[in-house]
Image: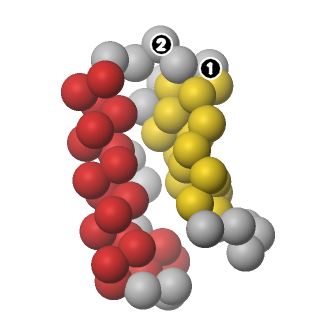
């Protein structure tokens, strides 16, 4: 399961939290929708690759 939240983030558009069984994607509340879409595309790629893909994801 992936929960998406909109919260104020400092200097980033999105943070994918994989520290628990229920992953959370935190999107910056002040970023434009286009940036949110790109972040979600990246998360979909991680999900497509499997549970260990997040360990190899690049930090932006």
Q: Is residue 9 visible?
A: no
Quadrant in the picture for residue 5: top right
Q: Is residue 30 visible?
A: yes
Residue at 37 percent of width and 71 percent of height: 46
Residue at 73 percent of width and 75 percent of height: 21
Q: Pointer 2: what residue?
A: 30
- Residues packed near mark 1 inside 10 Å, few (<14), some (14 to 19) or many (20 plus): some
Q: Which structural element holds mark 2? A: loop
The image shows residue 30, relative to residue 19, as above or below, that is above
The residue nearer to you, when weighing 57 against 38, is 38
Q: Which structural element holds mark 1? A: loop
Quadrant in the picture for residue 37: top left
Q: Is residue 17 left or right of residue 33?
A: right
Q: Pointer 1: what residue?
A: 8
Q: Position of residue 49 (x, y in %)?
A: 33, 83
Q: Residue furthest front?
A: 1
Q: Is residue 2 left or right of residue 14?
A: right
Image quadrant occupied by the N terminus: bottom right
Q: Position of residue 44 (x, y in %)?
A: 33, 64
- Residues packed near mark 2 inside 10 Å, few (<14), some (14 to 19) or many (20 plus): few
The image shows residue 22, relative to residue 52, as above or below, that is above
Residue at 25 percent of width and 42 percent of height: 38
Q: What sort of colour scheme is used for the picture?
A: secondary structure
Q: Are marks 2 and 1 in contact (CB under 8 Å)?
A: yes
């Amino acid at each position: 399961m992936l929960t998406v939240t909109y919260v104020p983030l400092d200097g980033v558009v999105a943070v994918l939290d994989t520290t628990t069984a229920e992953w959370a994607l935190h999107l910056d509340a002040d970023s434009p929708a286009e940036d949110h879409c790109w972040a979600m595309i990246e998360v979909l790629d991680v999900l497509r690759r499997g549970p260990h893909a997040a360990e190899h994801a690049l930090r932006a």
